[in-house]
Image (cartoon, grey):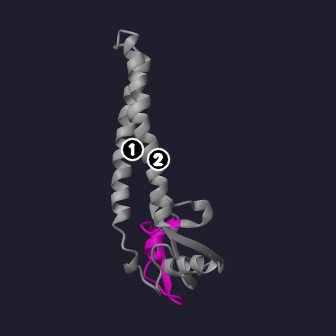
Amino acid sequence: MIEETIKTLQAEVEKLAHELNVTLPDALAKAIALGDLKENGDYHAALERQRFVQARLGHLTSRLTKLSQIDTSKIPLDKVGLGSRVVVRDMATKKKETFELVISDAMDLDLGQVSVASPLGSALVNKKVGETTEARLPIGTRKFKILELKTMHDVAKEKDDGK
């Protein structure tokens, strides 16, 4: 999971670096050639895009640095943590829900993924099967019981066994 996120972010970095170093200088040169920069919409648009790309590259570089520092050996083997797939029962509705705990850069709510830093993710982290937890969410407090757990290590082992 972490490796996939790193690859995705690196691909975006490469694309933005190309835009910053090739595409935008060409656009700026063409806009400058038109003259009067005060009212030159193309010039101002290219400068604005350049500032955005530089800021985005800074953010991505910071995220990549943080991701490369994650030590997966410190992720628990028997508790909910980063990369875990956890099945819970909502104690109020008695419905089962499945969540996968991910880093925010990899989150896709449609796939049942939640950030480990979110209120729900934080409530689940370090819990074991059979334990209950409360998540204080914007819609109110929800209480969950952990029914099933596959840690990042379990998921990786399944992938390795399936090869």
What residue is pinned by disc 1? Answer: 56
Label 1 SS: helix
Marks 2 and 1: in contact by CB < 8 Å? yes
**Magenta highlight range:** 114-136
Instruction: Describe residue 144's horizontal placement relative to residue 66 as left or right.
Output: right
Mark count: 2
Q: Nearer the viewer, mark 1 or mark 2?
A: 2
Q: Residue at x 46, y 47 (%)?
A: 12
Q: Position of residue 73 (x, y in %)?
A: 39, 79
Q: Residue at x 45, y 73 (%)?
A: 82
Amino acid type of the residue that numbered disc 1 sits on in the rendered structure: Arg
Q: Residue at x 35, y 39 (%)?
A: 54
Amino acid type of the residue that numbered disc 2 sits on in the rendered structure: Glu
On the question of residue 49 being in view, the answer is no
Q: Which mark is residue 121?
A: none
Residue 64 belongs to the span the image colors magenta: no
**Badge 2 local density, few (<14 within 10 Å), some, or many (20+)?**
some
Of residues 139 and 15, the one drawn nearer to the viewer in this rendering:
15
